[in-house]
Image: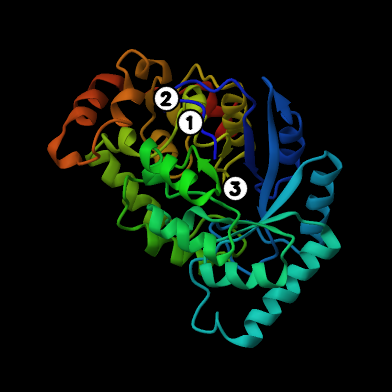
C-alpha cells in the first residue's frame, strides 16, 4: 500500500462521509442538500432496521419494515448508498441459537435483495463471519462498538470478513497506531469524528449492552427513559473533571485533512440527535471549518454536558495552543500530565446560551 504523505501533512483530495439518519424524514431531506460540498461528499447514510429483527447501538423511534424500505428508497434516489446497522453488543443468551441466526439471515436477505442495501455495520465478529459466508457481495464494516484498539484485534476482524473498520475512538489521536492498522491489514478505516464519550470510559460496555436490549423495545418515548442513568452519570463525571471535554477522542473539522494517509472516510454520530444538530455537524465537517462552540458539534456526553451547563468551548481557541500537535504526540498517560486540566480552565466559558442551543431546544 502506497502511503505518500507524512503523518500530519494536509491531504488535498476529496473526503467522504457516513451520515446518520434519525428516523425523521425531514432530517433526511435536509441531509440531501449536503450531498456534495467543498469537493467533499456523502458516501453513505447509515440507519438501523426494524426493531422486531435486531437491536442496534442507539435507541431509535420504532419503525416498520415498510418505513425502513421507504427511507432506503429515498436515499438511493439521491445516488447515495445505504449502510444498515446490526451492531448490538448483546442480544441475550439465544443470540447464537441456530433458529435466531437463521431468522436474522433471512431478514438480511430481504434487506440486501429486496431493498438493495449495499453495506452493513456489525459489532459481533461471529456475525461478521456468518454474513460474509452467506452474502459475499455485501460490504461489511466492523462497528466502533467492536472496540478495535490495536492491530491484533483489527487482524482478527479482517479474518472474520470485514472490509472496513471504525476503530475505537480512544485511538483516534494515535496516528502511528492508526497508520499501522491501515498498512498491515489493508482495510479501509472509517474514523468516527464527533462521539463525545469519556476517554476510555469504564461504563461504555455496560451502557451499550443496555442500549442493545432497550433498542429492541424503545417504547413510546423513543430515545428517553432508563438510558438516562448512564447519561447523567457521565455528565456528573465531566462536571467534576471538565478536562474530559478535551480528552475525549473527537476530531475537529479543520483537522480531517491531517489524517490523509490514514483515512479519507469519516463517520458522524447523531442517530438520536435533533435535525438541527445533525445538519450543523454535517455542514461543519463537510466544509472542514467551524466558527463556534465545538461542543455543539459533539454527540453524547459532551453535547449533553454543554447543554446542561451552557458550557462553551470556542473551536478556534484550540488553534492558538497547538492542540492537535500536542494530543497526537502525547503518550495518553493522563495521570502524569495536566495539560488538559490546565487548558480547559482557560478556554471554557459557562452560562453561554447560543442560538444553536436554542434551535436544538426548539426555541426561536
| Residue 59 quadrant | bottom right
Upstream in sequence: badge 3 or badge 2: 2
Are the residues tagged 2 and 1 within 8 Å (C-beta)? no
Describe residue 70's horizontal placement relative to residue 246 as left or right.
right
**Residue tagged 3:** 271
Q: Residue at x 71, y 46 (%)?
A: 24
Residue 52 visible, this orientation: no
Count neighbours of disc 2 (C-alpha within 10 A) and say few if under 14, some if 14 to 19, many if 20 or more.
some
Sequence order check, earlier mark of 2 and 1? 2
Callout 1: helix, strand or loop? helix
Percent across and percent down for residue 335 are 15, 41
Residue at horizontal 24 percent and vertical 30 percent from the top: 340
Q: State yes or no: discs 3 and 2 in contact (Cβ < 8 Å).
A: no
Let me know if residue 24 appears in the view. Answer: yes
SS of the residue under disc 3: loop
| Residue 274 picture quarter | top right
Question: Which percent across, then down, holds residue 310?
Answer: 39, 29
- Compared with 9, 275 (above or below) is below
Alpha carbons under labels 3 and 2: distance apart: 30 Å
In the figure, is residue 326 to the left or right of 87? left
Mark 1 Cα-neighbour bin, 10 Å: few <14, some 14–19, many ≥20: many
Front one among 97 and 296: 97
Mark number displayed over residue 259: 1
Residue beneath disc 2 = 8
The residue at 54%/23% (across/down) is 11
Which is nearer the N-term, disc 3 or disc 1?
A: 1
Amino acid at each position: 500500500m502506497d502511503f505518500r504523505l507524512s503523518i500530519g501533512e494536509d491531504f488535498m483530495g476529496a473526503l467522504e462521509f457516513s451520515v446518520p439518519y434519525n428516523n425523521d424524514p425531514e432530517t433526511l431531506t435536509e441531509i440531501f442538500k449536503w450531498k456534495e460540498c467543498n469537493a467533499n461528499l456523502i458516501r453513505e447514510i447509515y440507519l438501523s432496521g426494524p426493531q422486531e429483527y435486531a437491536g442496534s447501538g442507539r435507541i431509535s423511534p420504532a419503525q416498520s419494515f415498510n418505513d425502513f424500505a421507504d427511507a432506503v428508497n429515498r436515499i438511493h434516489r439521491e445516488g447515495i448508498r445505504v449502510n444498515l446497522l446490526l451492531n448490538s453488543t448483546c442480544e441475550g443468551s439465544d443470540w447464537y441459537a441456530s433458529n435466531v441466526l437463521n431468522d436474522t439471515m433471512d431478514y438480511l436477505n430481504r434487506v440486501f435483495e429486496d431493498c438493495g442495501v449495499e453495506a452493513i455495520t456489525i459489532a459481533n465478529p461471529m456475525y461478521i463471519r456468518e454474513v460474509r459466508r452467506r452474502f459475499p457481495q455485501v460490504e461489511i464494516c466492523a462497528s466502533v462498538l467492536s472496540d478495535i484498539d490495536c492491530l491484533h484485534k483489527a487482524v482478527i476482524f479482517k479474518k472474520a470478513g470485514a472490509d472496513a473498520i471504525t476503530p475505537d475512538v480512544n485511538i483516534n489521536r494515535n496516528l502511528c497506531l492508526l497508520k499501522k492498522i491501515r498498512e498491515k491489514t489493508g482495510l479501509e478505516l472509517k474514523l468516527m469524528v464527533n462521539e463525545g464519550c469519556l476517554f476510555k470510559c469504564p461504563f461504555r460496555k455496560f451502557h451499550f449492552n443496555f442500549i442493545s436490549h432497550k433498542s429492541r423495545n424503545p417504547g413510546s418515548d423513543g430515545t428517553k427513559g432508563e438510558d438516562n442513568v448512564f447519561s447523567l452519570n457521565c455528565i456528573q463525571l465531566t462536571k467534576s473533571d471538565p478536562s474530559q471535554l478535551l480528552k475525549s477522542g473527537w476530531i475537529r473539522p479543520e483537522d480531517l485533512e491531517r489524517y490523509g494517509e490514514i483515512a479519507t472516510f469519516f463517520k458522524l454520530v447523531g442517530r438520536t440527535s435533533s435535525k438541527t444538530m445533525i445538519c450543523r455537524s454535517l455542514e461543519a465537517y463537510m466544509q472542514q471549518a467551524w466558527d463556534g462552540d465545538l461542543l455543539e458539534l459533539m454527540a453524547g456526553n459532551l453535547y449533553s454536558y454543554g447543554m446542561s451547563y451552557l458550557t462553551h468551548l470556542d473551536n478556534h481557541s484550540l488553534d492558538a495552543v497547538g492542540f492537535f500537535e500536542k494530543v497526537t504526540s502525547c503518550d495518553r498517560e493522563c495521570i502524569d500530565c495536566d495539560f488538559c486540566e490546565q487548558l480547559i480552565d482557560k478556554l471554557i466559558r459557562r452560562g453561554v446560551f447560543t442560538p444553536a442551543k436554542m434551535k436544538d431546544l426548539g426555541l426561536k
